[in-house]
Every structure is written in C-alpha cells, then in structure tokens.
Amino acid sequence: MPTRPPRLSGILIVAGFLGLTGVALGAMGAHALKATLLERGMLTAWETASRYHMFHALAVFAAAGWLHTGLPARAIRLFNWAAWAWGLGVVLFSGSLYWLALGGPRWLGPVTPLGGLGLMMGWLLVAIAGLGKRS
C-alpha cells in the first residue's frame, strides 16, 4: 500500500481544519451572531472573513491534490509553500477580522493586511510554479 508524503498529510490536515472552521464560523455569523454583528456594524467584516476563509480552504485542498500529481520537485516545493502561506494568511486575515467583529482589541487592525499578504504570497507562489520548466 503506497504511503502519502508527510507534506501532503500536513496540508490535508490544514485544508480540513480550515474548511471545518470556515463553515462553522460562517454559520455562526449568519445565525447565532447575526444580531450582535449587525448591532456592531460588523456583519460585512465577518462575511468577508468567512468568504476568504472558505476560498482559501478550497485552495489549500486543491494544492494538496496538485502535490499528488507528480509535479517537478520545484513545483511541489512552491505548492507546498503556497498552501502554508494560505493557511497562515487565513489565520491572520480572517482571524483578525473575526476577532475585531466580536469587539477584539483595535491593535488587531494592522494584523489583517499581514494576513492578506500571506494570501497573496500563496497565489504568487502558484504563479511562479506555473512559470517553471515543463518536464
């Protein structure tokens, strides 16, 4: 029976965790927290966090699939780094927006763009992988 490379297992765990928490937090914002978020004027922030959270959970899952297709070693490394950049980006970007929406400290505001940079870095790494030599 073939074994999965360790990096694939880790990325699948990240994808599963991001997907699970993205659905749960999206549902909480749409139902249990909706009145509170509306009162604070933060429903849009929560929805943005949830949307980016889920988009990037799917991107991490897709990266795990690409890692299993026999790409050249350089592309595998870039996809691996992209997946981790997206995971960290979601934690910083969406996490800070969720926390701010619930009344978290304002010092979290500057954390949000750092998370956005992590998300963009993941996409840049995918583009770089696409520019690599074909094998």
Image (cartoon, grey):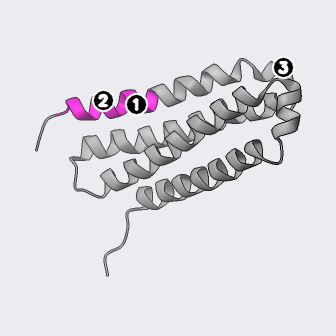
Three-letter amino acid code at disc 2? Ala
Residue type at mark 3: give it. Answer: Arg
Q: What element does badge 2 sit on?
A: helix
Quarter of the picture containing the N terminus is bottom left
What residue sits right under mark 1 in the picture? Answer: 123
Q: Which mark is residue 106?
A: 3
Identify the residue at horizontal 22%, vertical 55% (top origin).
70
Q: CA distance from mark 1 to mark 2?
A: 6 Å
Question: Which residue: 67% across, 34% down?
Answer: 47
Which residue range is magenta in the image?
121-132
Please tell me which of labels 3 and 1 falls first in the chain. Answer: 3
- Horizontally, residue 130 falls left or right of residue 103, namely left
Above or below: residue 39 compared with residue 71: above
For label 1, count other residues whose C-alpha is less than 10 Å away and answer few (under 14), some (14-19) or many (20+).
some
Residue 104 visible: no
Q: Position of residue 11 (x, y in %)?
A: 48, 53
Task: Name the residue located 51 percent from the left edge and 38 percent from the top edge.
Answer: 86
Q: CA distance from mark 3 to mark 1?
A: 28 Å
Task: Name which residue type carries label 1.
Answer: Trp
Residue 108 in sight here: yes
Label 3 CA crowd tier, 10 Å (few <14, some 14–19, many 20+): few
Q: Nearer the viewer, residue 20 or 105?
A: 20
Quadrant where the C terminus sits is: top left
Q: Please indicate whether residue 81 sits to the left or right of residue 135 in the image.
A: right
Alpha-carbon span between mark 3 and mark 2: 34 Å
Query: What residue did someone put label 2 on?
Result: 127
